[in-house]
Amino acid sequence: MSSTIRYAFGESSLGAFIAATSDRGLVAFEFAEPGPSPVRALQDRFADSQVVEDMAGLAATIGKLAEVIAHPDRDPGLAIDPRGTDHELRVWEALRRIPAGRTVSYGAIAAGLGAPREAREVAEACAANSIAILIPCHRVVKKDGSLSGYRWGFKRKRELIAREQTVQAFQLA
């Protein structure tokens, strides 16, 4: 085993979630009901690591993540350790530059990365994202501005955007 991945489940205003950390930061933050399936998914994804439950050790992290679900415009101050291809990492970094309360199209992200014809590849990178909200794929929409799919459900995407836009509107008032 090359490393240890610690995980814990939490509850939030948008449902149950699982969080997992490496020694460098958060590697997964996904909406999921407690049970063996999300744990098996972690074990499959991090096959070269020991995956262990650590509810007590991750209690503060779980609390911060529940708070960021309630207030997705806030930075919880957690280090992240995203795992993906070079392309996915570039897309995810671009997503992190989208301000809370704003949305950007897949095509605009692709154009910003110098590959304007690769909107589909941007969508695929969003679908591969395993760190909800902190890598804000919920802020990416179709070219016409309408909402598209979201790995953790359309209703959650709509609610996260609404929460951010409400805060933004309040700050502008």
Image (cartoon, rainbow, N blue to C red):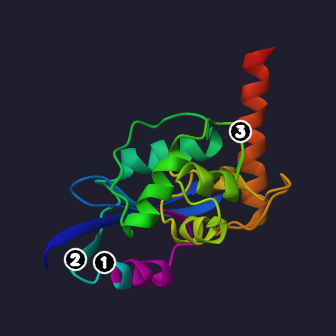
Foreground of the two, 44 or 108: 108
Determine whether the residue tagged by mark 3 lies in a helix, strand or loop: loop
> Given contact means CB atoms under 8 Å apart, are the residues at marks 2 and 1 in contact?
yes
Q: Say which amino acid is labelled 2.
A: Ser
Pick the residue in front: 131 or 118: 118
User: In this figure, which residue is indicated by the disc labeled 1?
Assistant: 46
Task: Determine the secondary structure under disc 1.
Answer: loop
Q: Magenta stretch: give its range.
A: 29-43
In the rendered image, the quadrant that contains the C terminus is top right
Among the 4 quarters of the image, the one containing residue 44: bottom left
In the rendering, at what x and y percent does residue 159 appear?
77, 50
Check the image and report above or below for 53 versus 141.
below
Disc 2/disc 1 C-alpha distance (Å): 5 Å
Q: Where does the image place residue 123, in percent across and percent down from the top left?
A: 63, 67
Task: Say whether disc 1 or disc 3 marks the residue closer to the N-terminus.
Answer: 1
The number of numbered discs placed on residues in the rendered structure image is 3
Q: Which dot marks residue 96?
A: none
Q: Is residue 75 left or right of residue 73?
A: left
Instruction: Indicate whether residue 34 is drawn in magenta.
Output: yes
Foreground disc of the pair 2, 3: 3
Find disc 3 in the rendering and name its residue: 102
How packed mark 1 is, by other alpha carbons closer than 10 Å (few <14, some 14-19, many 20 or more), is some
Label 2 sits on residue: 49
Residue in view at x 20 percent, y 69 percent: 4
Q: Secondary structure at mark 2?
A: strand
> Crowding near pointer 2: few (<14 within 10 Å), some, many (20+)?
some
